[in-house]
Amino acid sequence: MVSFANDPEASVLSSAAFMSVDSSSPLQYLLSILMSFRLLSISYFLPDVSLPIHVFLCSISVLVHQLLPSSFQFQLSRIFLSNHRSSSSISRSAITIFFHLNWFNQDAITTVGDTLPHQHQLRGHHQSLKINFGEILPYQRDYIAIELWITALMELDLSPKLAKKVYGDDGGSYYAWCPTELPMLREGNIGAAKLALQKNGFALPRYSDSSKVAYVLQGAGVAGIILPESEEKVIAIKKGDAIALPFGVITWWYNKDDSELEVLFMGDTSKGHKAGQFTDFFLTGANGIFTGFTVDFVKRAWDVDDDTAKALIGNQQGKGIVKLDANVKMPEPKPDHRKGMALNCEEAPLDTDIKNAGNVVLLNTKSLPLVGQVGLGADLVRLEGNAMCSPGFSCDSALQVTYIVKGSGRLQVVGVDGKRVLETIVKPGNLLIVPRFFVVSKIADPDGLSWFSIITTPNPVFTHLAGSIGAWKAISPEVLQAAFKVPAETEKLFRSKRTNDAIFFPPPK
């Protein structure tokens, strides 16, 4: 069952639809109120309404709708499209409202569907933006056909986005990318967030509902990591460090330096509470687990007296991040604790290094075995000024989530039916997701381009289409000639290029 209670787009859409209806006819006005009550009751008063009640409400709505003239039904369709034809993404709840209004009207659906822009271009994104109407509709008649149409309606928004502040105080701030602004987060079950700590900033102990990879973007500090049934590891962290954080790990973060400490988190939310978002559970603070238990439970569980229990529950009023006094002493990092916990991607041996073009460091089970428990791989790629990264794709159905660390450059993504689905300039702080099997390529600006990516498999495999290891090099000449419909001379010229360059290409001379 779908709840619209936390979806402002859905509530606005439903209000706009019914307030905009021609109320010249008392009957139409009355019926529109009845339908509005049905949607709002499901959205706000009965978010978890049982299936029988939902079927009953839908049945009444259908009977009422069938009494209306077709012009009224089409008017609701036009209202919906006027609100959303130009938007880059449409929430599932808003789409569901539209479908509830029109599900019985196949003519309306067909007519409106035929007028949608980009229908051909977006048709191939079905697998990336699949909506399971079997979970939404009490009646499953033709929902597969409608699902394909809704997929065409939802424009695939791959444009890079910046993180937004979620909470913070003098000690620092926590930022996150929102799935409503970057729909591929939800569709790919990927979460992304950043922690920025000022001097003496302390991120309170917490655990998460998702496995993650942390990457230190700037600064230096100390991290405490407690794996399940294991002792605390206190490690020094600095710019370039990558840390694997499996399920169940408890972490805290502290910055004792003058410069800001900034840590990026990206991970898998498929087992989390919200698709595309991390949910953290704080051990202390105003929103920590101690505040949820009564004093007698805390006394019994930790074998303390009343005053101690009340102090544990109420003394720390900060939420998530606090600023400690300068005289507070925190644990010192231990060098032996760092082994197997972190890998500095800026100092690690290069897995690929192309002169005057670029290099890459891989984070996999070989370089950091703990990523096997996380189920993710990662890499740090650095392109020299005006260099190019070969067009390529993940050939093991993995998603690639990319954060721009430094520099800027051009990026293009090509998807189904050879359609260029994204062409943009990427800059530091941008986050973007490349759908499965889509081909991506980047060209750095004169100042170079660096990015950190996670891949939704611990040992990813990529296919590159250009360069000495490009897939075209493995195809026989006759096949290339037939495929491109070119003479042998053109095929030979094509094959003779990029014989020494792999993955990264230096700037043109």
Image: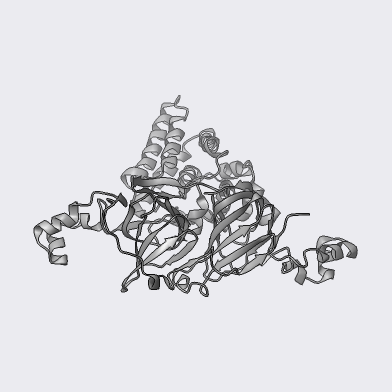
Residue 476 at what x, y percent from top left?
81, 72
Give the total number of marks visible in the rendering.
0
Judge left or right: residue 389 versus residue 367: right
Residue 356 at what x, y percent from top left?
69, 60
Judge left or right: residue 206 versus residue 260: left
Indicate whether 496 appears above or below 185.
below
- Using the rendered image of the protein, determine whether residue 361 is visible from the camera's viewpoint: yes
Rendered residue at 43%/39% (across/down): 64
Indicate whether 165 appears above or below 22.
below
Indicate whether 166 appears above or below 67.
below
Rendered residue at 59%/60% (across/down): 381
Residue 97 at what x, y percent from top left?
45, 44
Judge left or right: residue 454 versus residue 290: right
Quarter of the figure that contains the N terminus:
bottom left
Residue found at the very far top of the displayed protein: 24
Instruction: Please name whichever residue, 248 or 352, is drawn nearer the observer in this view of the structure.
Output: 352
Quarter of the figure that contains the C terminus:
bottom right
Instruction: Please name whichever residue, 260 or 93, is drawn nearer the observer in this view of the structure.
Output: 260
- Using the rendered image of the protein, determine whether residue 126 is visible from the camera's viewpoint: no
Residue 35 at what x, y percent from top left?
40, 38
Hey, which quadrant is residue 281 in on the image?
A: bottom left
> Which colour scheme appears in the figure?
one colour
Judge left or right: residue 47 versus residue 268: left
